[in-house]
């Protein structure tokens, strides 16, 4: 979720080199797609699928590639951040990941009455740009909803959405939604693990976060304009910069916030990212007393 901020070009200059935004031309989405989307999650069908790569060798999770669920962290990877992700994935499979607390804490009795959804937390190595990438040296993918949508206009979220009957589980649903929203074919994404489910009470969704990795982010294709205004690829190091962090407050609620070139990531997405970065050991000290107040104006979240 985000607030609408000054023109993206102005903010991009302020955050030069830290994030890349791929624009989409806004258009009215289909009613069917809008109805099945959890808050802060949007997507559009791709104009054409990317060329399929040969699947990576190895076991599968829900019909998709993953690391060996019976083994510990694999051999030392070239990328240090990938090692941290493999360790978190191993803990997730062992059931030792600390669950997200607070309003999003999982309660089986409550979840029984909620709809199932999944989001993809997709990481990729930060492209070389003539200077060292900010630690931990990986990017994460977000999407920004069109401001023309009736529900949750302009919000920033992780790619994801409601799980369909045709999906072979949560991981498959997250892969499908990621393909629809950022144009990256599922064969180019390695599913590392499913993290513990979390609740989004405001929309009555039980959401399974899926941890993913890709070395082929540049193979993403364009998607049709509609619900997604921008695909945002941002270095995790930029999100973790204490200068871009704050607690976002709105109508008496407080959530972790991260500033990106087109606004603020907050609410469920902010809280989930804050939690995952902490579990990975990447979080840097920041001023948790700093608050950015927001308010609603004709459906849009703007600075108070």
Image (cartoon, helix red, strand yellow):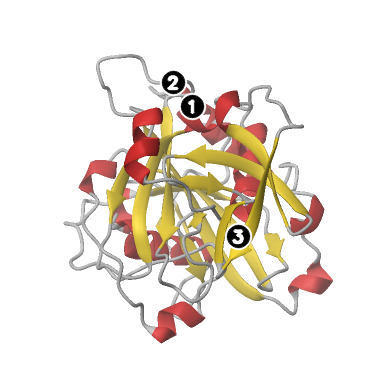
Of residue 47 and residue 184, the one placed in the foreground of this image is 47
Q: Is residue 15 visible?
A: no
Above or below — where is 36 with respect to 127? below
Quickly name the residue at label 2: 134
Q: Secondary structure at mark 3?
A: strand
Q: Earlier in the sequence, mark 2 or mark 1?
A: 2
Q: Are marks 2 and 1 in contact (CB under 8 Å)?
A: yes
Q: Is residue 77 visible?
A: yes
Q: CA distance from mark 2 to mark 1?
A: 5 Å
Total labels: the figure holds 3
Residue 44, picture quadrant: bottom left
Quickly name the residue at label 3: 208
Q: Secondary structure at mark 2?
A: loop
Q: Secondary structure at mark 1?
A: helix
Nearer to us of marks 3 and 1 is 1
Q: Position of residue 218 (x, y in %)?
A: 23, 42
Farthest-out residue, top:
131
Around disc 3, counting alpha carbons within 10 Å, would you say few (fewer than 14), some (14 to 19), or many (20 or more)? many
Residue 72, picture quadrant: top right
208 left or right, relative to 79: right
Q: Position of residue 251 (x, y in %)?
A: 74, 59
Say the numbered circle drawn on residue 113. Answer: none
Around disc 1, counting alpha carbons within 10 Å, would you say few (fewer than 14), some (14 to 19), or many (20 or more)? many
Quickly name the residue at label 1: 237
Q: CA distance from mark 2 to mark 3?
A: 28 Å
Q: Residue at x 25, y 15 (%)?
A: 130
Above or below — where is 186 with respect to 45? above
Q: Earlier in the sequence, mark 2 or mark 3?
A: 2
Q: CA distance from mark 3 to mark 1?
A: 24 Å
Q: Residue at x 57, y 58 (%)?
A: 301
14 left or right, relative to 184: right
């Amino acid at each position: 979720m985000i607030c609408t901020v000054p023109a993206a070009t102005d903010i991009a200059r302020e955050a030069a080199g830290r994030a890349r935004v791929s624009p989409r031309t806004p258009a009215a989405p289909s009613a069917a797609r809008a109805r099945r989307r959890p808050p802060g999650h949007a997507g559009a069908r791709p104009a054409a699928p990317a060329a399929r790569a040969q699947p990576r060798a190895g076991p599968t999770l829900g019909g998709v590639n993953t690391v060996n669920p019976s083994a510990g962290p694999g051999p030392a990877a070239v990328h240090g951040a990938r090692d941290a992700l493999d360790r978190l994935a191993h803990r997730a499979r062992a059931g030792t990941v600390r669950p997200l607390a607070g309003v999003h804490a999982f309660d089986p009795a409550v979840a029984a009455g909620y709809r199932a959804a999944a989001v993809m937390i997709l990481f990729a190595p930060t492209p070389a740009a003539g200077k060292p990438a900010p630690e931990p040296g990986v990017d994460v993918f977000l999407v920004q909803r069109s401001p023309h949508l009736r529900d949750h206009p302009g919000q920033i979220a992780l790619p994801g959405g409601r799980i369909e009957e045709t999906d072979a589980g949560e991981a498959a649903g997250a892969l499908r939604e990621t393909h629809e929203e950022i144009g990256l074919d599922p064969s180019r994404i390695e599913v590392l693990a499913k993290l513990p489910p979390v609740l989004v009470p405001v929309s009555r969704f039980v959401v399974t976060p899926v941890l993913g990795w890709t070395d082929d982010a540049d193979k993403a294709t364009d998607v049709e304009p509609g619900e997604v205004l921008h695909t945002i690829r941002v270095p995790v190091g930029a999100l973790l910069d204490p200068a871009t962090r704050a607690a976002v407050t709105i109508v008496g609620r407080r959530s972790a916030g991260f500033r990106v070139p087109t606004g603020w990531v907050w609410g469920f997405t902010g809280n989930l990212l804050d939690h995952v970065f902490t579990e990975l050991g990447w979080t840097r000290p920041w001023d948790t007393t700093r608050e950015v107040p927001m308010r609603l104006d004709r459906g849009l979240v703007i600075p108070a």
